[in-house]
Amino acid sequence: MSSRATIYSFLGIGLAATLLLIVAPVAYAISLSFYRMDSFVGTPQWAGLDNYARVLSDWTFWRALINGFVYSLGTIVLQVVLGIGFALVLNQVFPFRNIVRGLSILPYLLPTVVVVLTFKWMVDGSIGVLTAVIAALGLPPVSWFESPAAAMTSVILVSVWMWTPFVTTTFLAALQTVPASLYEAAKVDGTNAVQRFFHITLPMLKPILTVIVLLRAVWMFNKFDVIWLLTQGGPVGATEHLAILSYKTAFSLFDIGGGAAIATISFLILSVAVFIYFRLFPLDTD
Amino acid sequence: MDEKDHKSDLSRRSVLKVAGALAGGVMAGGLAAPAVHAQGTKTIRFLNAETSIDSIRALKVAAAEYERQFGTKVVIDSVPLDGVFTKVTTSLRGGTPYDIATFAFVGHVLILASEGHLVPLNELTDKYKWGPNILFPIDGKVYWYPYDYNLAWIYYRKDLYEKNKLEVPKTWAQFLNNAQALNGDGRSGALYPIGSNGATNWLSPGFMWAEGAKIFDDKWNIVFDSAEIGPKVAAYLDFFGELYKTMPSGASQASFGEVLSNFTSDKVAHTAYAGRLIEGLERNNPKLADQYGIMPYMDSTGKHQAVNHGYDGWVVLKTPQSDEAMKFMRWFTENQYINFLHTAPLHFQPPRLDVYDDARWRAHPLIEKHNAAVEEMRRFLTDKNIILTSIDTQGPTPSLKPGKIFEAFVFPEMLQNKCLKGMASAECVKVAADRMRQVIA
């Protein structure tokens, strides 16, 4: 087989897989948003744009959208800032560095369900180990989920704990590509560590940072499992974002079309955001 | 290796040959398959949602026995309850439907029945007398065979009551007084969940039902905030707001597990659950297994009482194997029903009233030991003064409408507005009623 045939073969397999596993399901989900259906065994009735009109006129949609932005922004900023900070520390030379580097990735390796259930039991109001420690210290009990703000903060903190290692590891790997000679030259010029970070490290790692922020933004905006397992969107809808609202609408409220409409709008919002992001921070700067 | 070499390794002809051989093989296999199936054992598929080891084992033992007696293989698949409806609808869409499935929500039964996917089970259910509000007939046809009432009632600590000289409460004020009296010394007065989850919908509305609250009138209008019902719900919220102050922090996250563990580990003096809590005490804290008492939810005046039901049962789907599935269900419900109930002897509260007098059922050691509780559970079904209802079964007939209100967690959010946001009770009721109207629109 010629090299061109090989290329076309692999391209064909890739395209077929993309069509079958991504394009077709997305197209199907979008098509569902134009129908009224109680369940997947019900008879679909054409609804046109009714589902979209209904969803967009529902205040819970706008609440979920705002919650999604708060959650995404909160988790991304903290993950990136902490992740870069940890990467810079782990890039230094110190005893047992390799062991510490290995341990730092641990939260990312744990299954979400394990992390969330462990956290929930640790902060349980009666028998949680953190509750017991706080009580032993004579401090007032912490309400981890008892108010909308506390619940959102808890969800963000758990998410940051789980996924900061991804930023750390990626950034740490990228740090290895910055030539040491640049830092040495800057030191000779009398720059301090902060100046070297902002004038050498950050500009050199801008492309990888662009990708990290983009990936984290997409993943966090669509993140379902951690919020579902922690709060199911509560209390009073305070942690319900579009992914949760879409799921609840489709599978709990027996409104498949409405759920699909929310998912489609969410997809469009994300697509537009990614487009704008790449316009602002193009990867290929030449 | 150059292009020539590549061509010699994998020519178009050789690719076509392999593809042809594969296609031929697949076709031959496909054509042969029906003949193989026709010669084989009949098989029916049973989707179970009771995932305890004992329940799965009991079903598998029954399946093996049935195959031994009748030659029909019964395949038991088990999934958690949350995944049952999705699994059943997916199997229907995929063309390989389950023949029997477990459901715990009348809305799911209704959807499948209205689409013609269920077989009426009247010939099985008509043989017995059943407790109230459990068969959910649709146009006179019963589409499921219940095995568990899942009633939620109040648990209290008899030993603490005796020690503190407290009376068994008959009104909200007395109950609140008892919860406040037992709040402290490393123990909370009560735990009733308020999170957006099924536990809250199940365990916390009982006081409201006892007060006479309802969601719909006979024409499916929302009457939750009407002049008659609204003040009752507001009074319930005032009471619950005070009760919340005796609860441990984390009530907004508490679900089934937290409720069980808090009472079992002596961390709360009052809570609500079904019989699984007694089983949990026996298993994890036997000392407390002799110290609990149960009672229905009470109203503000001491005149009315209520229990909140969940429920579980089996449906038979219309499939090519429906006749075989019905045959199996006929055999299973006659011969194995009590064995299955015994896998959670105090939790699976029989909806069939004959079971309470069945010596085989009574013979289970836990049922014998907790006879007082079992008799009280029976009274919940037979005492005409006890209201037996739930959010998802409100309304004049079985419908998806209350199910949507259940799943939208309108009731938990009402409690959260009261307890977490400090909203006035009347406003909480109004917000909840408006949300109910929006959800069912």
Image (cartoon, coloured by chain):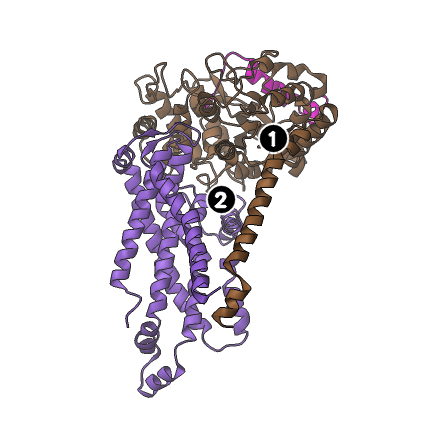
Q: Which chain is purple?
A: A
Chain B tint as drawn: brown
Residue type marked 2:
Gly
Depth check, front residue: B20 or B38: B20
Q: Which mark is residue B348?
A: none
Q: Residue at x 45, y 76 (%)?
A: A92
Residue A143 seen from this side: no
When asked about the image quadrant of residue B349, the answer is top right
Disc 1 target residue: B45
Percent across and percent down for residue B332 are 66, 22
Q: Is residue B85 above or below residue A186?
A: above
Residue A52, x across and y down, in percent? 28, 37
Mark 1: amino acid:
Arg
- Is residue B366 magenta-colored? yes
The quarter of the picture where residue A276 lies is: bottom left
- Specify the principal SS of the magenta part: helix
Image coordinates of residue B351 in percent, x first then y, are 58, 19
- Pointer 2 chain: A
Magenta-tinted stretch: B363-390
Question: Vertical placement of B110 versus B200: above or below?
Answer: above
